[in-house]
Amino acid sequence: MTLEIITIPCLADNYAFLLRDKATGKVALVDAPESYPIEAALKEKGWGLDMVLLTHHHYDHVDGLPELVAEYHPVVVGAKADACRLPSLDLALNEGDTFMLGETKGHVIDVSGHTIGHIAFNFPSAHAVFTADSLMALGCGRLFEGTPEMMWGSLSKLAALPPDTVVYSGHEYTASNAKFALSVEPENAALQSRAQNIASKRAQGVATIPSTLSEELATNPFLRAALPEFKSAVGMSDSSDVDVFAAIRKRKDNF
């Protein structure tokens, strides 16, 4: 692993993440829901802050940025496609672009759907992807701006990453997501086991983020829409993959 990664609870149910390149000591932050817990974590570790990676423009991912910029003067990175709605960017990137955190290379993936211009940050050498409100633990973000076709395409890109990739998503929604997942695929033994583990963790106040992509592929209904067994479970055996995804997303909206 080329990165040391720290998960920071913020607001009511958000997460931010600090990434430290082990080779150089350079530090990045993924999203800035609020400044206080992030600054506290930096001070506890004795770290500076060299870079902030913004996934999308929603307030609960950017509101803490002004205080952090004033204190640490990091390079602010975000999507060129959403630059008009993000805080001022020092580096505006598109899908397929790469950047360096010290000696660790990051890759940009367009995961539009929750919002247009939402991006994920993938660090292959660290086996880590930061997905915010696109792919979530046992879920995916609500489609505020994009279409089902767009979000299904975004999730398909993430599903194609190596199964041992660790998925760092943006919210502690996993317990409620598990209840929904069980409602649509109650016979999934891997899901049953994962739901029990999640309930135990939450009872102890333990975070359920991150997860692994292999876990998500086995249990997350929004990644399973193309599988014949899943289509059969939801009574849509003859439907297209994207139609199944759209139906499950609509069902979750009303759950």
Image: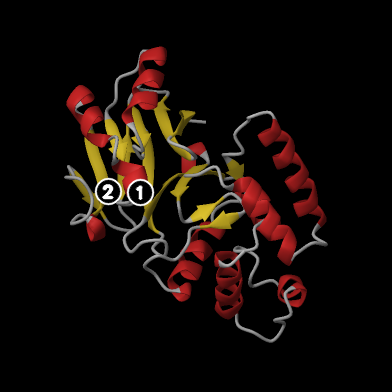
Task: Indicate whether 37 appears above or below 156.
Answer: above
Which is more toward the observer, 99 or 254?
254
User: Mark 2 or mark 1, which has the lower sequence index?
Assistant: 1
Check disc 2 and report the residue beneath it.
Answer: 78
Identify the image quadrant of the C terminus.
bottom right
Which is more toward the observer, 10 or 229?
10
The quarter of the picture where residue 28 lies is top left
From where the camera sits, is residue 172 visible? yes
Residue 18: image location, x then y, percent: 41, 30
Q: How crowded is mark 2: few (under 14 residues within 10 Å), some or many (20 or more)?
A: many
Residue drawn at x 57%, y 39% is 209
Give the structural element (helix, strand or loop) at label 2: strand
Residue type for callout 1? Thr
Residue drawn at x 60%, y 64% is 222
Task: Indicate whether 74 appears above or below 194.
Answer: above
Q: How crowded is mark 1: few (under 14 residues within 10 Å), some or many (20 or more)?
A: many
Residue 224: image location, x then y, percent: 65, 65
Check disc 1 and report the residue beneath it.
Answer: 55
Task: Indicate whether 166 appears above or below 244.
Answer: above
In the rendered view, does 255 fall on the left or right side of 170? right
From where the camera sits, is residue 102 visible? no
Residue drawn at x 36%, y 54% is 119
Give the structural element (helix, strand or loop) at label 1: loop
Residue type for callout 2? Gly
Residue 149: image location, x then y, percent: 46, 75
Cα separation between marks 2 and 1:
7 Å
Tell me, yes or no, whether the two marked residues, 2 and 1, touch with CB atoms within 8 Å: yes
In this picture the colour scheme is secondary structure
In the rendered view, does 62 fall on the left or right side of 20? left
Residue 92: image location, x then y, percent: 21, 50
